[in-house]
Amino acid sequence: MLIRVLSIHPAHAFRMAMPLSHSPLLKSPSYLLLRHHSFAPPSLYRFLSFRSLSSPLSSPFSSLSSNRSSKKWKQPIAALLEIGGVKIAKDDVVKENDPTNNVPDTIFSKLGVELHRRDNHPIGILKNAIYDYFDTNFPAKFVKFDDLCPIVSIKENFDDVLVPADHISRSYNDTYYVDAQTVLRCHTSAHQAELLRKGHSHFLVTGDVYRRDSIDSTHYPVFHQMEGVRVFSPDDWAGSGMDATSYVAMDLKKSLEGLAKHLFGAVDMRWVDTYFPFTNPSFELEIFFQEKWMEVLGCGVTEQEILRRSGRMDGVAWAFGLGLERLAMVLFDIPDIRLFWSTDQRFTSQFSEGKLGIKFQPFSKYPPCYKDMSFWISDSFTENNLCEVVRGIAGDLVEEVQLIDNFTNKKGMTSHCYRIAYRSMERSLTDEEINQLQGRVREAVQSKLNVVLR
Ligand code: PHE
């Protein structure tokens, strides 16, 4: 159960994924265990043949496609896409025989969907509402980017924003690698350095980001972020009587409090100090919503080294990154993150351009179906790899994968029992369908993950 608690929320991986020396979780054996697994070098993943999972025969949608009633679940996998002027063939991203590639078909199928560019979709409506806030408060200042290609170099994704060489977010367990030098961006911060180098001093970058993770109603391996950066020059803080960092931190907090008010109305909010490799000081903004404090974004004063390397010696900047799904789930009352990908009219027709206040009316709650599976794990086992395998077979029919039992016997063998919740957001699933899925999941787990089913 502890593992569930420690799992990293998409919007906060960089906060949680701090270097060991900074980690408040240092003393937690489970956390160390997770870290240990996460640091497995690429070679350890050679046995993980994701490709065979994604052959047409075993596509999550293929077994269903023979079932007429479920045809709407079948999403085409485009062979050639164009994103931000870059042409991308499937073979460029999903590489059969490259052991340094861990991108499955299910992830490739999300490239180019760009929910954030749909004005009638909750993610696009939210993006536009944030744009409105910046346009009103900083007229004609912020330049907006929302079609930058999500395939980036490890230099852009990590090095340029000072993510340490041994940082957990670089592991094959946490990030989708196209090859050893190229990843699907795991945050929109991947574009900071280049835009700074190009001379931009006020910008917003919205995009789809990709992280390997566990499965539940708030975790999905693809989600959307918006990054904001503002660079100040000495003239800006000169008359303030404050040092540059304090001045910029104050402006950052003021700007983001205004954004939270714009989106949520008059809410209680609080700042929490945190750690990110690319900002110092670093903060999180929490708002009090539905009886709980909820983190809505990470931000801070940009590390001076990032500006220096971008040729902006005398500037001081702030940056923030917010997770759009997280905010949209609250603003639109959307109970499950998979719904954002639904093409069911009963979902899509409920939202329209410019309307932030609309509350989603669930069309029906179909019953979940639970299936348990137990196996002896090997040293290389990770929950993220399990989730990838399950998602590869069951697609969006899987709602949650939860560790419910965990023990080590006298011989030192460790057993895990996972409970998989299957539930469609759009229809009832038959027993037969679930049993068939579970059978295929068991087979795939056994053959891909080097575990022994019990
Ligand atoms: N990139 C961070 C994340 O994905 C968010 C962030 C952006 C934090 C910019 C600080 C500054 O978690």
Image: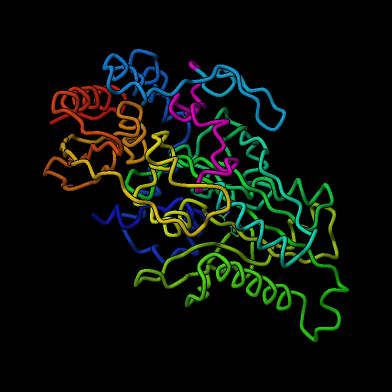
Q: Quadrant of the N terminus?
A: bottom left
Q: x, y (%) of residue 324?
A: 52, 52
Residue at position x 46%, y 20% in the image = 76
Q: Position of residue 12 (x, y in %)?
A: 48, 56
- 304 relative to 365, above or below: below
- Horizontal placement of 382 versus 228: left or right? left
* Quadrant of the rendered image holding ligand 1: bottom right
Which residue occupies 53% across, 46% down? 224
Q: Which residue is at a point 51% across and 40% down the rendered structure image?
A: 210
Please tell me which residue is depicted at 47% across the width and 77% down the height of the picture. 268
In the figure, 67 relative to 199: above or below? above
Q: Quadrant of residue 40?
A: top left
Q: How is the image coloured?
A: rainbow
- The segment highlighted magenta reads 96-122
- Magenta segment's dominant SS is loop
- Check the image and name the residue furthest to the bottom: 241
Tell me where residue 11 appears, x and y as whole percent: 49, 54
Q: Is residue 53 magenta?
A: no
Residue 281 visible to the viewer: yes
Above or below, comparing residue 256 to residue 29 in the picture: below
Is 119 a magenta residue? yes
Q: Quadrant of the C terminus?
A: top left
Q: Quadrant of residue 104?
A: top left
- Confirm whether residue 414 shows in the render: no
